[in-house]
Image (spheres, rainbow, N blue to C red):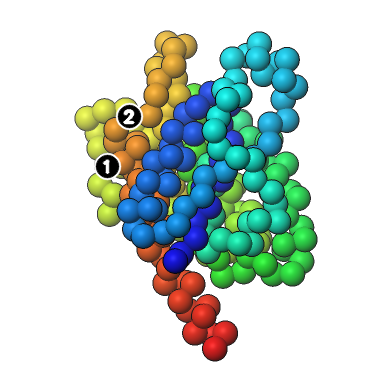
Amino acid sequence: MTKVLVLYYSAFGHVERLAQAVATGAREAGAAVVVKRVPELVPEAVAHRKGYRLDQPAEVATVEELADYDAIVIGTPTRFGNMAAQMKNFLDQAGGLWARDALVGRLGSAFTSTGSQHGGQETTLVSIHTVLLHLGMVVAGLPYSFKGQLRMDEVTGGSPYGASTLADDGQGGDRQPSENELAGARFQGRYVATLARALAAARMTEAA
């Protein structure tokens, strides 16, 4: 069975919700899915004061286990048009995997959250793609066959680079992922699992 890791960082829960939707889509496509998060770097006292979600049920991942999966879908909020420091710190520790080509030929994908409609979603997703490509992974986005990203009747995330959500209602208030944004994440999960299964079969054939 194809093994998919949904690896995320989420301070306030928006990316966490997308991660669960991605996982649901991948399971619908028949994959065995694990959802894990990267370690928090913010001091606990500061995180409490800022209202971070510190009780997330997902286990904390290790870098070495990345090689155990056929596909890795990475989710992180945007920080000035780039991935959050927590995710970058985690991925920066993958030098050993890179050195032994442990992730070459595996599938990689990404999703994100921003505080505003034009807050750097696409550059954040591409920044993750860059890391995946350096690790030798095959990159999948969110194709336009998901028609929800073409909607013009409501504010919505989503781009060909990956699923996304907007975390601010424009007035400084909390906005949770919309059904359209969650549908995009589920679509991406199914898409990734389907492609990963084909890639895994090709690797097995080549090894034989």
Amino acid type shown at disc 1: Gly
Report the front residue among 176 and 4. Answer: 4
Q: At x 41% / y 59%, what residue is drawn?
A: 31
Q: Which of the marked residues, 1 or 2, is nearer the chain's N terminus?
A: 1
Q: Name the spot of residue 15 as percent of width and height, x first.
A: 49, 34
Quadrant where the N terminus lies?
bottom left
Report the front residue among 188 and 69. Answer: 69
Q: At x 39% / y 41%, what residue is drawn?
A: 21
Q: At x 72% / y 20%, what residue is drawn?
A: 44
Q: Is residue 73 above or below residue 177?
A: below
Quadrant where the C terminus lies?
bottom right
Report the front residue among 102 and 163. Answer: 102
Q: Which image quadrant for residue 105?
A: bottom right
Amino acid type shown at disc 2: Ser
Query: Which residue is disc 2 drawn over?
Result: 178
Residue at the farthest bottom position: 208
Q: At x 67% / y 67%, what residue is drawn?
A: 102
Q: Name the spot of residue 39 as percent of width and height, x first.
A: 68, 36
Q: Name the spot of residue 55 as percent of width and height, x first.
A: 58, 25
Could you tell me if residue 182 is visible in this image? yes
Q: Is residue 170 above or below residue 142?
A: above
Viewer-side label of 1, 2: 2
Task: Quote the CA–CA distance across marks 1 and 2.
Answer: 11 Å
> Which mark, by number, is residue 49?
none
Mark 1 residue element? helix
Q: In screen coordinates, is 146 left or right of 73?
A: left
Query: Which residue is disc 1 drawn over?
Result: 148
Q: In screen coordinates, is 82 left or right of 117?
A: right
Q: In screen coordinates, is 153 left or right of 185?
A: left
Q: Name the spot of residue 91 as percent of width and height, x first.
A: 69, 48
Mark 2 residue element? loop
- Label 1 Cα neighbours within 10 Å, binned few <14 / some 14-19 / many ≥20: some
